[in-house]
Image (tube, helix red, strand yellow):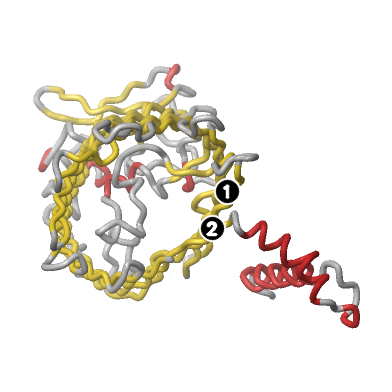
Amino acid sequence: MQSPYLKAVLSICLFLSAAAARGQHYLSEYDSTLFIRDTARPILKRLEHLHFSGYIQPQFQAASARGAATYAGGNFAEFSASRFQLRRARIKVDYILPAKGRNLPAALFTFQYDITERGAFARDVFLRLYEPKTQKLSLFMGLLARPFGYEVNLSSAYRESPERGRMSQVLMPAERDLGAMISFESKKDSVRKPLFRIDAGVFNGPGLSAPADFDSYKDLIARITLKPYALGPHLSVGAGLSLLRGGWMQVSHYRYETVERNGVKLFGVDSAAANAGAEAPRHYYGADVQLIYTHRRGRTELRAEYWRGTQPGTATTTVNPGSLPLTPTYIRKFDGAFLYFIQSLGSPDWELVAKYDWYDPNRAVSGREIGGAGAGFTAADVRYGTLGFGINYYMSTQVKVLAYYEHVRNETTALTGYTGDQRDDVFTLRMQLRF
């Protein structure tokens, strides 16, 4: 059986061969003048509007125990505590359609694919239309990044840590979704005037974790961003506010929320018939700030981002589902944060990174309240904090080597398996090339 990758390569080769043969029916008719006129020039004219980019991230990882459950690139195999992995290998193609008679874009088509040992997956496939006069407004439609948060939208090719924090991986798996978005960007008409970007869109909700949208409820997501603004000759600030209002359909009429009865916290049930078919609330609120101090040896940067809200889930997980849950719905109030400290070490080529993130899926309970008899709390209610630190070495503007260690701690509970800290620390050594 032919590999799908081989078929794709052969198809591309046939396409290119057909293009090169245009204007030439037989080999004996080959004429360089005809080839340049009929084939080369039209192709080159099309290619001048194409932009190719991409990056590759091969890595080696070692965990503190075999079969470690981790958000540092996925769980380890049952009997493995070390692995080589192709974390990401992405190719991105952008085609810009120029506006008629103007040196400005009228539309943009973006296509990005991720190809690793785990398979091939689409990451971005969208069309962007520009308002022709001022270029301040644009409309997106297709598979694109959700406009929520700073770390979620920071490309993995530029992020200083190997992975996004646990909270964003749980609540925003794969970061993208199908939908439509309007974007407004202010233009620089004054040196002292701050620049803003406002994004607002409607999305399916499940994102790339689902092959198709499984209900009619949609997510409204919006973000306002203050682009880096100079506070002085060496200091700048950026910031953002994010909002998500949505949810997914409840199939069961059983709905659980954390309550307190006689001084004991537990999941209380609401069994109203109207719960079946209603929307399980998915509401997020986020705020972030970035302070950057530049100096002759590089930069010092502080980032802080905080999320808070309501997340629907099941008894055993708070991960946004890829298929419609058929079990009772559990509503939890969550919060979490991402904190970064980035410091150049003697030159811009060497960089120290320290990061702390936490995710508390159920703010209403903590510690040994989790695991009590009859309370209904599970591993889905356990708080996690991750302290990471590492060094980035930039061999050039395109090549980077990263060494990073993550120390993960879960809260101590009365729940079996969580009465102490699990062994799930991970060390990552990664190389990256981007173009």
Verify CB contact (< 8 Å) between mark 1 and mark 2. Answer: yes
Task: Report x, y in % for residue 64.
Answer: 19, 69
Work out which quarter of the rendered image holds the N terminus and state it. Answer: bottom right
Relative to 417, say whether 183 is above or below.
above
Nearest the camera: 280 or 141?
Answer: 141
Nearest the camera: 140 or 20?
Answer: 20
Relative to 208, say whether 199 is above or below.
above
Q: Secondary structure at mark 1?
A: strand
Q: Is residue 375 left or right of residue 52?
A: left
Mark number displayed over residue 329: none
Mark number displayed over residue 96: 1
Three-letter code for the amino acid on which mark 1 is drawn: Ile
Image quadrant in which you'd find residue 377: top left
Relative to 393, say whether 204 is above or below.
above
Task: Report x, y in % for residue 350.
Answer: 18, 68
Three-letter code for the amino acid on which mark 2 is drawn: His
Mark closest to the chain's N terminus, 1 or 2 = 2
Work out which quarter of the rendered image holds the C terminus and state it. Answer: bottom left
Question: How many other residues sit within 10 Å of disc 1, few (<14), some (14-19) or many (≥20)?
Answer: some
- Where is mark 2, residue-wise? 51
Task: Report x, y in % for residue 13.
Answer: 70, 72
Nearest the camera: 31 or 62?
Answer: 31
Task: Report x, y in % for residue 57.
Answer: 38, 68
**Which residue is painted at 23% across and 70% down in the image?**
393
Q: Is residue 276 visible?
A: yes
CA–CA distance in space, label 1 to label 2 = 8 Å
Q: Secondary structure at mark 2?
A: strand
Q: Is residue 65 left or right of residue 43?
A: left
